[in-house]
Amino acid sequence: MKVVSVVGMTGAGKSEASRVFEQNGFIRVRFGDVTDKEIKQRGLELNEANERYIRELLRQEQGMSAYAKLNLPRIDSALEHSDVVIDGLYSWEEYTFLKTYYGEDFWVVAVWTSPGTRYQRLATRPERHLTLEEAANRDRVEIENINKGGPIAMADFTIINESSLENLRQETERIITKLR
């Protein structure tokens, strides 16, 4: 069984690529579900500020590989039934933890999109909408505080997502074929 993590900056198209994996029989594990659950348990509003607060708090309390460790039971359980796609691996420490744990069965697909294109998409997407300022700030925080660049740099495959949703889907399908 394979574990494939889709990585990239906010608004690059990670969730869309992950959906294509899911449509091809992979079970999707979204790391952000841990954040959403914690926000609800604390009675907080689901917004960018609270998401950042919880992400940073969990990593402060449990280390930079917190999300990989917290999601490991979900991944292992899903692997009993199918290949798994992870939506939302961020940090270098999460990457190294999972690479060590799963070894040759762990693959990374980076979705790269220029900041200008991502910011435009983020400003108009219906859910988890971000302003230009929020998106640029999130980029800075994720690069400087969450070590997000490492997994993107170490990807086994990279999709350039500067054009259409259909192109992103086709490129993702191409990678799925190579992995099988």
Image (cartoon, grey):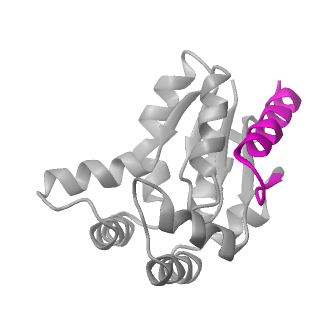
The quadrant in which the C terminus is found is top right
Q: Is residue 45 visible?
A: yes
Above or below, 23 relative to 39: above
Of 95 and 14, nearer the camera is 14
Q: How many marks?
A: 0
- Whether 159 is among the magenta residues is yes
Whole-percent x and y of residue 167? Answer: 80, 44
Residue 171 in which image quadrant: top right
The quadrant in which the N terminus is found is top right
Above or below, 106 relative to 39: above
Above or below, 126 relative to 121: above
Residue at 68%, 39% in the rendered image: 4
Whole-percent x and y of residue 100? Answer: 66, 48
- Whether 74 is among the magenta residues is no
Task: Tell which residue pokes out farthest to the top in this image.
Answer: 81
Horizontal side of 164 relative to 125 (left or right) equals right
Horizontal side of 167 relative to 36 (left or right) equals right
Residue at 73%, 71% in the rendered image: 114
Whole-percent x and y of residue 67? Answer: 44, 54
Would you say the magenta stretch is mainly helix, strand or loop? helix
The part of the chain drawn in magenta is 158-180
Q: Is residue 100 visible?
A: no
Whole-percent x and y of residue 59? Answer: 39, 67
Residue at 67%, 76% in the rendered image: 116
Above or below, 60 relative to 126: below
Task: Tell which residue pokes out farthest to the front in this image.
Answer: 124
Residue at 68%, 49% in the rendered image: 99
